[in-house]
Structure formats: C-alpha cells, structure tokens
Image (cartoon, rainbow, N blue to C red):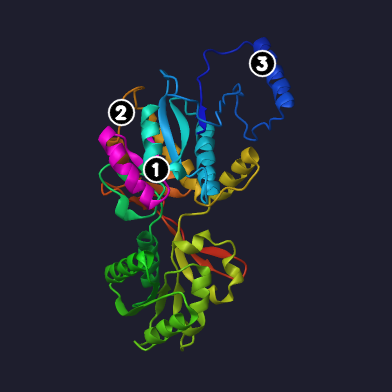
Amino acid sequence: MASLSLRPQARWLSPGELMRLLALALMAMVIAGCVPRTRTVTPPPPPQEEVQPTRPIGRLPADETRNRVAVLVPLSGPNAALGQSLLNAANLALLDTGGQRIRITGYDTARGAAAAANEALEDGNALFLGPLLAEDVRAVAPIARSAGVPVLSFSNDSSVGGDGVFVLGLSPGQSINRVVAFAASRGMRRFGALVPTGTYGQRAGQAFTAAVEGAQGSMVGMESYSRTPADMRAAAGRLNGHGRADAVLIADGAQGTAALVPAVRGVSPPPRLLGTELWATEGDLAANVGLRGGWFAAPTDANFGAFRTRYRARYNANPFRLASLGYDAVLLAVRIAANWPVGRRFPARELTESTGFAGVDGVFRLRRDGTAERALEVREVGATGTTVASPAPRGFD
C-alpha cells in the first residue's frame, strides 16, 4: 500500500525563515538524492510529500484533517505495471492540485479485490478509485455499496456500472457511436462491420447497430470471426457478398484490423475503414499501411503530452495511456472535496449533478446509469501518424 498526503501551511514565513527552510530542503535533497519538481509554484511550498511504500500492521492512524481515498489497483502480478502507473498518476494529480483535504492510499487488488476493499474500509476510506478489471469491480461493488462508499472504477465495461459504481474507462459503444456519426456527417449511409467473437465483439456489434440506426444509416451486413487467418478471410468474404458499403467497422486492435484490410478494401470503390477506441492504445498506427485513411474516435491527446512530461519527471518512466484515468479521477475527487466535511460520507450526489469535469482526457460527466459520457475527437490515420479529423466538443448540451 502506498499513501500520500498533503498538509496545509500553517502561516506565512518571514524572508529569513524562508531562506533557512529552502537551504535545509536543498541539503535534504542532496543527501537523499531527490529530484526536485520541474513545475514552478510561486511562492514555492515546503516539501509536502509523505509516502509509505508498504502498509503498516494494523489500521492506519486516524486523520482529523483529511478524508481518505483508496486507489484499488493491481500492484503485483501480471498487471502490476499498469496498476502502479494508475496509482502514480493519482498521486501526481494530488500534488499538482495541492489538494489538502484528501489522502490517497493504494491497495493491491491482485491479492484479492474483496480483501483490498475490506482493508480500505477498515482504514477509513470513504471513496474508492478503481478497480481496473471488471471482475474486480463486481467483487468490490457490494462491499462498497453496503458501506455507502462510491466506486469510480477504471474499467471500460459498462455492464458493471450503476447503483453507486461508475465506469470511467472508455467503452467501445461511445467510440463507435462517435465515429459512425462522423462518417454519416460526411455523407456515408451504408455501413458494414466485422467483429471478433467474444464479449467485446458482441458489445461492439450491438453498439454499431444502434449507432447506424441513430445516424439514420442502413446496415449492409455484420459478420463475426475467430482470430484465425482462414476464418478472418471467410468473414470478410461474406461481408463483401452482402453488397457495397460506404464504411466498414473492424472492431479489433491494429494488428487484427490490418489482417482483414486486404479483403475489406479489395472491392471497388473501397469503403472507408472505421476503428474503435482500441486503436488509441496502439504505439504506431501509421506503420500499418492498410490502416491509413481510417477513422476512429478516442479521448483527446491534446493534454496527454504535458501529463506525460510531468509524470516522467517525477517517476523517471513513461505512464501507460490508461494512467490518465487515475489522474482525472483525483481531479474529480479534489473538486468535490471542497464540499466534503472530514469524517463524513463522500457527497456522491455531486458526481452526477455536475455539467462536466475537465481532465487529461478532455471533458466528461458521470451519468446516473454509472457510465461516463466523454467528449471524443475523431482521428484519421496518415503516413506519419494521426491527425484530428473532428475535434472533441468542449462541453455537453
């Protein structure tokens, strides 16, 4: 478990006291080998970070000045690196905002999500950020619900949301709806889709059907495939047999999509290729020549570069792309903490009453059904990377 807290400064210092404090701080950094923050604040605050790398035996000491917020993420096992990146981002957000009313503590869900949730409750946490995996959210939800603790999960599975649980991750449905609406605005009316077998493909297919209907388009056909070369070719052939489509969605990552592209674009004129939010996590889409000209919708990257620079300066590593969820969750908590009396329940009603929150991933708002509505941009894959084909809205109607 890792814990971070920020304490308010008791009074203004005289110039002489400030100089002595800065000298002592500099000496401490030299001795400890610390790296000073690159972000400048005026006047410079005294060192405020207090980190406990492991959980002490027994309950945490009572805190009468801050509310406790638990970050439930995998800190061991195969997803440990991603979990640590989410926790680091959450701590970075607390430092960047100077939030002095909350204290963040990390709990390892790889040892058991239910055990981590119970431990967090024992320590007095009144808000859960995480878990990451949908199955962990299902394990944590009833425990948190019985204690009146809201859950801001990092999952993208909308089926786990509701009744005090919110899903901060971008669901395929949101991405698909945005890119289909954009394609329709460019005059495309006939749509086809290729979706992989399994839960993700089923949800993507349902979202695509609803999106095409909402855009007043027509469905040429939709075929599913297992990830074998022969089955993928067969599915693409069946889709082509339904007739010409203006645009075809392939609900897969870049590698899977690239394998299907030759058959999909082997007709004349070739359809516009549409992707899902999975493309946003790919390192170099432009390297796949077949993806060029394709469109997909994702949260804006406009703020991620600055976030990555601050993260790298503090932790000497690059953040995972999903780490922005940890950062934005804390921004939301800090904003609401202004109306959160210490020792009381988190004011959960304010989560859905806001017109929106701005974060690294742009503007989003939480809905009563437990999903997060996000303002997404549409990007086009080019020879040197991606460009913004349609900017993300700055707010909601």
State the SS at label 2. Answer: loop
With 261 as the anchor, is 356 left or right in this view? Answer: left
> Where are the magenta residues, as a range?
127-151
State the SS at label 1. Answer: helix
Question: Which is in the foreground here, disc 3 or disc 1?
Answer: 1
* Residue 333 position within the rendered picture, expressed as x and y whole percent measured from the top left: 40, 35
The three-letter code of the residue at mark 3 reads Leu
- Does the magenta-highlighted stretch encompass residue 174? no
Q: Badge 1: how crowded within 10 Å, few (<14), some, or many (20+)?
A: many
Question: Which is in the foreground here, disc 1 or disc 2?
Answer: 1
Question: Can you tell which mark lies on residue 113?
Answer: 1
Above or below, comparing residue 358 to residue 269 in the picture: above
Question: Which is in the foreground here, disc 3 or disc 2?
Answer: 2
Nearest the viewer among 243 and 1 is 1
Residue pictured at 40% horizontal, 66% vertical: 179
- Does the magenta-highlighted stretch encompass residue 149? yes
What residue would you read off at disc 3?
21
Q: Badge 2: how crowded within 10 Å, few (<14), some, or many (20+)?
A: some
Above or below, comparing residue 225 to residue 3 in the picture: below
With 150 as the anchor, is 65 left or right in this view? Answer: right
